[in-house]
Image (cartoon, rainbow, N blue to C red):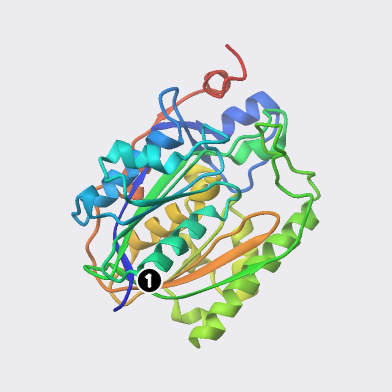
Amino acid sequence: MTLGISGYGVAIPRLRIKREDYAKAWGSFSAAGVNEKAVAGFDEDMLTLATKVSARALESVPLTPDKVTRFAFASTTPPYTEKLLSGTVLAGLGAPGDTYATDHISSTRAGTEAMLAGFEHLAANPTGCALVAAADAPMASMWDPIEHAMGSGAAAFVLSGFATLAELEGSASYVSEYFGERFRPREEGQTRDLNVKKFSEGSFVTNTTRAATALLKKLGRKPEDYAHVVVQQPDARAPASAAAKLGFQDPQLAAGMVSVALGDLGAASTPVGLAAALEASKVGDRILVVSYGSGAGSDALSFKVVSDRKPAFTVSKEAARKEYVDYVQYLKLKGAIR
């Protein structure tokens, strides 16, 4: 049985802040290539976004929650440090309590980690159905330049062996030790970075290219075999360096480059980018997805599009639904001022 994506959905908070508003407040904007970013509202956290986007993914098949046998939730900004969050999302969906559920919350690689967990479940249970949701809004000190890129968004996928939109062709991973880039100590609520750019860039390129190269070799593929490539997006320029090393061209990156308008989506970066690439794809197209989590590790997944069916809630529609806030309003939404 061929496993793949049977449905998907996205959810983007409607609030946005422009790079110009950061520049007015700071005199500069440190998120390379990002024009504006999505901002979670007072009534939005990662559980509400995950529940919303999961319901949308199920509706796109369509499929009822009771058919889900495996659920995986991914985020780097869960509202609780210790609590099973995937169970909360399942309860919100009305899914049965015997659904096997897990949280993936320690790395921006978590989106693909959760997706691979779903596919592993299906490999062992071919008649099952997995639901994967990635919702994130990375957080850092308002005085730290890495905060400038951090946005918010979510994507969810129904994985199964029936009614597939895109077939999974294979995957590969690579992990290594790179201490000092993006991390969050247990006693702190905000992400930090030692801001040694060359060190971080070296880790990003090394891990993403090695995971992708291993997958291309495994499948006997070349960069030109892919219509779209989606690479983790801490900003809107980092993916280009890794893609260029692999032999991909800018047009192959274009459809999945969601950070330009939404910012760094953390664990939801590659899932939302994949949803955007699926939206732009046609039958026969191949999509390469390469995630990254500092520390460090990467997953690479290859999909072949087999259906032109599109969901009701696409990245383009969600991105177009927006309302701008200024920097003072943004600080209030982030809880930095009252």
Q: Which residue is mark 1?
A: 124
Q: Position of residue 178 (x, y in %)?
A: 76, 58
Q: Is residue 96 above or below residue 249?
A: above
Q: Residue at x 53, y 66 (%)?
A: 250
Q: Quadrant of the N terminus?
A: bottom left
Picture residue at 79% right of the left edge, 57% below the top? 198
Residue projecting furthest to the front: 98
Rendered location of residue 161, percent (x, y):
27, 70
Residue visible at 31% across and 77% down in the picture: 2
Q: Quadrant of residue 123?
A: bottom left
Among the 4 quarters of the image, the one containing residue 44:
top left
| Label 1, residues with CA under 10 Å away: few <14, some 14-19, many ≥20 | few
**Furthest residue in direction top, as rendered:** 338
Relative vertical location of residue 85 with respect to residue 251 in this rendering, above or below: above
Locate residue 269, reporting x and y percent: 50, 51
Which percent across, then down, holds residue 55?
A: 27, 44
Q: Is residue 126 left or right of residue 269?
A: left
Q: Above or below — where is 319 with respect to 67?
A: above
What amino acid is found at the position of numbered circle 1 in the picture?
A: Ala
Query: Does residue 156 lie above or below 141 as drawn?
Result: below
